[in-house]
Image (cartoon, rainbow, N blue to C red):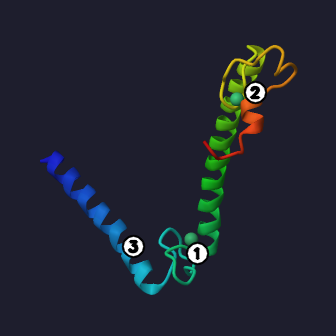
Amino acid sequence: MIRHDVLKFNALNAKHRKTYRDKHEALGLCVSCPNPALPGTKYCGLCTSKSRQRSRKRYQKHKESVNERSQLRRQGYRSSGRCIICSRHLDSDMDAGNVVCTYCIVRPRGVG
Ligand SMILES: [Zn+2]
Ligand SMILES: [Zn+2]
């Protein structure tokens, strides 16, 4: 009996949430706060900028971690005497002091 009531209550709640969104959407209001929504969107300027900031932060974090990883890889290649682009072992005569092999220097970027 109690379980049934809880289920009913949850269903009502979900329905209420949906109506709230629908009503706001129909009225041209932000679906997550009572502010008017920006034209063509479901969110007001505040909520849009908030979500944009969140996604930008996430993106930046992702970029940083990728950068860190590629930097580590490059450092690894460099310290083991390998080309940081193709990981080919550098020639001690031809490629002395380089971090990129002769092949990668000669080869145009993006070709091959
Ligand atoms: Zn809003
Ligand atoms: Zn190379």
Q: Position of residue 101 (x, y in %)?
A: 75, 27
Horizontal side of 9 relative to 93 (left or right) equals left
Q: Secondary structure at mark 1?
A: loop
- Queried on whether the Cβ of the residue with tag 2 lies below 8 angstroms from ligand 2, the answer reads yes
Q: Please state which amino acid type lies under the numbered disc 3.
A: Tyr
Return the x and y of residue 10 as percentages of the image width and height: 27, 56
- Between tags 3 and 2, which lies in front? 2
Q: Could you tell me residue 91's position as x and y percent?
A: 77, 17
- Ligand 1 has an atom within 8 Å of the beta carbon of the residue at disc 1: yes
The extreme left residue here reads 1
Q: Are marks 1 and 3 in contact (CB under 8 Å)?
A: no
**Residue shown at 44% from the left, 79% from the top:** 24
Q: Position of residue 61 (x, y in %)?
A: 66, 42
Circle 2 Cα neighbour tier, 10 Å, few/some/many (<14 / 14–19 / ≥20): many
- Mark 3 and mark 2 lie on one chain; the one further toward the N terminus is 3
Camera-side residue of 48 and 109: 109
Query: Residue 82 lies in what quarter of the image?
Result: top right
> Callout 1, which amino acid?
Cys
As helix, strand or loop, the secondary structure at mark 2 comes to loop
Disc 1 to disc 2, C-alpha distance: 53 Å
Determine crowd level at label 1: few under 14, some 14-19, many 20+ residues with C-alpha closer than 10 A: many
Using the image, tell me which numbered label, if any, was put on residue 8.
Answer: none
Q: Which residue type carries mark 2? A: Cys
Pointer 3 local density, CA inside 10 Å: few below 14, some 14–19, many at least 20 = some
Q: Which residue is mark 2?
A: 101
Nearer to me, 24 or 62: 62
- Identify whether 22 is placed above or below 4: below
Badge 1 or badge 2: first in the primary sequence: 1
Residue found at the far right of this picture: 97
- Residue 35, picture quadrant: bottom right
User: Which residue is at 36% across, 66% downward?
Assistant: 17
Say whether disc 1 or disc 3 marks the residue closer to the N-terminus: 3
